[in-house]
Image: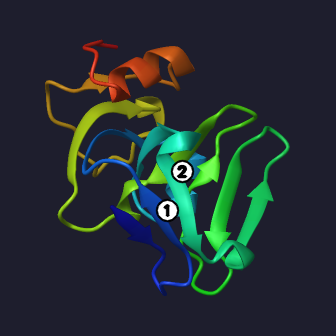
Amino acid sequence: MIGSCLCGSVEFEIDGDEFNIYQCHCSLCKKQSGTTSNSSTIVGSDSLRFVKGNDSIKSWIKDTGFRSDFCSNCGSPVPNPLRDLDLYWVPVGLLPASVKATVVAHLCTSTISTWHLVGSGVAKFQDVPALELLKQMLAGRSCRG
């Protein structure tokens, strides 16, 4: 499946067409996305390949380690390496509408916007859960927070 930024300068290929995703409601993700949450998934580095536009990608890294990679032409967030791990953070809004995405977790619900409604049946975490737990959830293993 091919994903791209708003202007199409950055394109990437990702293995699969069905993903478990999470929505993060922390202040950083809300500001990065400009919405009430950031809908994302995490994949192994071997599952994502940039097709074009590496030279259009700029990075901003906060002193805490929070990283935001974005297209320097249109400003869209784009996949970026997750810390020093063999993983990529992927904003699922860059994928085609045909992607099958299931929200399995809401993170940082302690800072959720008052107008954002979260249904039942989805794991909710006041903060960010341990990475291993989140990876298990995204891989389809049932866990409740």
Mark 2 touches mark 1? (CB < 8 Å): yes
Looking at the image, can residue 78 be seen?
A: no
**Visual colour scheme:** rainbow
Q: Is residue 48 above or below residue 96?
A: above
Position of residue 25 relative to residue 76, above or below, is above
Looking at the rendered image, the quarter that the N terminus falls into is bottom left
Q: CA distance from mark 2 to mark 1?
A: 6 Å
Q: Is residue 55 left or right of residue 9?
A: right
The residue labelled by disc 2 is: 29
Q: Secondary structure at mark 2?
A: helix
Residue at the image position 27 percent from the left and 23 percent from the top: 140
Q: Amino acid at mark 2?
A: Cys
Q: Is residue 132 visible?
A: yes
Q: Residue sitting at 50 percent across and 19 percent down?
A: 129
Look at the picture and state if 30 lies above or below 54.
Answer: above
Q: Is residue 41 left or right of residue 89?
A: left
From this view, report whether residue 139 is shown above or below residue 81.
above
Q: Position of residue 130 (x, y in %)?
A: 54, 16
Q: Residue at x 68, y 72 (%)?
A: 54
Q: Residue 132 at what x, y percent from top left?
A: 51, 16
The residue singled out by tag 1 in the image is 33
**Amino acid type, mark 1:** Ser
